[in-house]
Image (cartoon, rainbow, N blue to C red):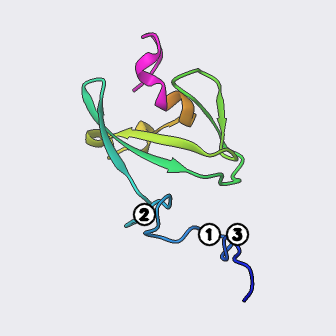
Amino acid sequence: MAPRSNRPRRRGRPVPGRAGSPAPGPRGPTVVEVAWAGQVWAIRQVGPTGTGRVYRCPGCQHEVGADVAHTVVWPVDGMQQLDNRRHWHTVCWSARERRRPGGSFA
């Protein structure tokens, strides 16, 4: 009998439905709604796109490149206009409750 291998047999993309894999939504990755700052926000994790676009993070005011995984946030009530989307560093979005007021969050 051969010795047991502890290495994963499959490499590559995560398997949907398995722990640690985001479940795909109707139009891509899952969108989650969160109540914050008196509004309901939809959030989505976005991977590197390679489009070369650069955004300004409302949490730290530094640039967020499209070539970096980040979080896109928009108010649920205001999604009629794409201008309402904000691109945050994932760390900045996670720390939004601990930041001082004064940033442009909406």
Could you say which is closer to the camera, residue 80 or residue 57? 57
Provide residue 100's location: percent of width, then percent of height: 46, 10
* 92 with respect to 34 (left or right): right
Q: Earlier in the sequence, mark 2 or mark 3?
A: 3
Q: Which residue is mark 1?
A: 13
User: Does residue 56 belong to the magenta stretch?
Assistant: no
Q: Quadrant of residue 25?
A: bottom left
Q: Amino acid at mark 1?
A: Arg
Provide residue 90's location: percent of width, then percent of height: 54, 36
Q: Which residue is mark 2?
A: 23
Q: Secondary structure at mark 1?
A: loop
Picture disc at residue 77:
none
Q: Earlier in the sequence, mark 3 or mark 1?
A: 3
Q: Which residues are magenta?
A: 94-106
Give the Cα distance between marks 2 and 3. 24 Å
Q: Which residue is mark 3?
A: 7
Q: Amino acid at mark 3?
A: Arg
Near mark 2 (Cα within 10 A), the count class, few <14, some 14-19 or many ≥20, is: some
Residue at image x 65%, y 54%? 49
Q: Amino acid at mark 2?
A: Ala
Could you say which is closer to the camera, residue 67 or residue 98? 98
Give the Cα distance between marks 3 and 1. 16 Å
Near mark 1 (Cα within 10 A), the count class, few <14, some 14-19 or many ≥20, is: few
Dominant SS of magenta comes to loop
Seen in the picture, residue 1 relative to 106 is either above or below; the reply is below
Q: Secondary structure at mark 3?
A: loop
Seen in the picture, residue 21 relative to 57 is either above or below; the reply is below
Seen in the picture, residue 97 relative to 1 is either above or below; the reply is above
Give the Cα distance between marks 2 and 1. 13 Å
Viewer-nearest of labels 3 and 1?
Answer: 3
Residue at image x 57%, y 34%? 89
